Image (tube, rainbow, N blue to C red):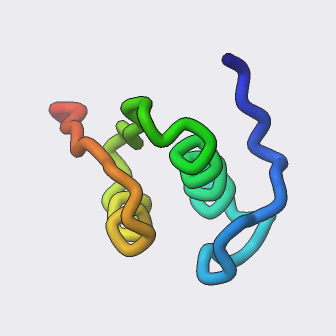
Amino acid sequence: MLLQLNQILIEPFLGSKDNNDDRILASLITLLRKHPNNYVNLVNEDINLHNKAEYANVPFVEVNSGK
C-alpha cells in the first residue's frame, strides 16, 4: 500500500501541514482509524517524534542506530 503524506491533518493539536512530523502522525492516525484490526506502529529513532506519538496515542517502537 502506498501512502500519500499530503492528507489533511486530522487532529488539531498536530499543527502544521508543513511539519513533516505532524504529517507522518496524521497519516498514521488515518491508518489506525481505517484499519483498526491491523498492527500499525511508528518505527524510527527521533525522540521528538516519539514524544508527539505518545501524546497522540500512536504506538511507536524506539530504535537505536548505534551511533
> Which residue is drawn at the image coordinates 62% and 63% (left, top)?
22
Point out the image quarter for the C terminus. top left
Query: In the figure, 35 relative to 30: above or below?
Result: above
The x and y percentages for residue 26 are 64, 57
User: Camera-side residue: 36 or 64?
Assistant: 36
Farthest front residue in view = 37
Query: In the figure, 23 relative to 41: above or below?
Result: below
Point out the image quarter for the N terminus. top right
The x and y percentages for residue 18 are 79, 64
The x and y percentages for residue 52 are 43, 69
> Which residue is drawn at the image coordinates 75% and 73% (left, top)?
16
User: Camera-side residue: 44 or 59?
Assistant: 59
The x and y percentages for residue 10 are 71, 66
Q: Quadrant of residue 49?
A: bottom left
Farthest top residue in view = 1
User: Camera-side residue: 11 or 24?
Assistant: 11
